[in-house]
Amino acid sequence: MAKDFCHPKVVAGYDEHIVQLIPGYALMHAQVRATLTVQLTAEAHILVVGCGTGYEIEYLLADFPKIHITAVDPSLNMLQKAQQKIAEHADSSRVNWLLGTTADLKPEAQFDAALCLLVAHFIANDQKTEFFQQIYQHLKPKAYLMTYDMLLPSHANELKILQHLCQVQGLSVRQSEQMLERLEDDFALITPQQYCDTLLKVGFNSIQTYLQVINYFGFLAQK
């Protein structure tokens, strides 16, 4: 059974577990933070797709005192945890919270950038084009999309390397074994080329790889 991101136990341990489970997690966020600092204006409006517990929202509010954020997540428990975190540590008045998906955004909503971090690899492969199309249609001209996802390994050893790396980061041997056992249930994987082709298909005309850690890839795409 795929991981249930609405389950209270999963939500409660998410922040501690994610840094062990996802290679390059801290570096990915550091690069997102630096890239947006260079690319965005001071009063940008940012869409955060699958905001989870609000990790990136917290540093975005700190880095950009005048920005506004629309945070979207289909899990009520995740959204509530993010709201609590931001209320305790940042100015929550600059965040619009939406329980649902990008399909639930108002048609006229337009953003200067979108973050979609560790989300698309959970979207069924036959739904990925529509998923990215929904994000694309809510971006202003020249706006940016930053993603980070697990993609299809190019050879079997990549998964073995991933397993050992996750153990170095804090997973137990059994946890790392369970991670590999659940790949088919938890993830819908495509190749890096298929991923980029999907982004091109929906209309993005500039796609760069900003980070790769084993079979995790981060892409910066511009409308």
Image (spheres, rainbow, N blue to C red):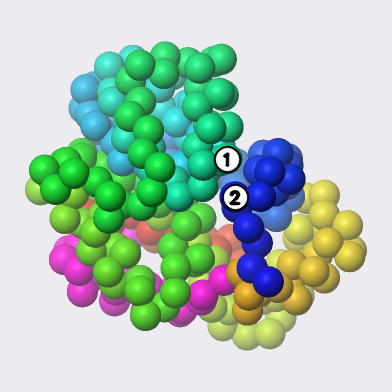
State if disc 2 and disc 1 touch (CB < 8 Å).
yes
**Which residue of the protein is positioned furthest toward the bottom in this rendering?**
155
- Label at residue 6: 2
Q: Nearer the viewer, residue 92 or 27?
A: 92
Q: Quadrant of the C terminus?
A: bottom left
Rendered location of residue 112, percent (x, y): 20, 39
Taking 71 as reference, is 183 above or below it?
Answer: below
Q: Is residue 205 magenta?
A: yes
Alpha-carbon distance for marks 1 and 2? 6 Å
Q: As shown in the figure, which amino acid type bears the numbered disc 2?
A: Cys
In the displayed image of the protein, which residue is found farthest to the right?
Answer: 173
Is 123 or 208 nearer to us in this picture?
Answer: 123
Q: Is residue 195 magenta?
A: yes
Q: Residue at x 23, y 64 (%)?
A: 133
SS class, disc 1: helix
Expressed as whole percent of the image width and height from the top left, the position of residue 84 reads 55, 23
Side of 152 where 130 appears, left or right = left
Q: Which residues are magenta?
A: 187-208
- Residue at horizontal 37%, vertical 80%? 126
- Seen in the picture, residue 1 relative to 70 is either above or below; the reply is below
CA neighbours of label 1 inside 10 A, class few (<14), some (14 to 19), many (20+): many
Which residue, given by chain and number where applicable, does mark 1 sit on? Answer: 77
| Marked residue nearer the N-terminal end (1 or 2) | 2
Asked if residue 223 can be seen in this view, the reply is: no
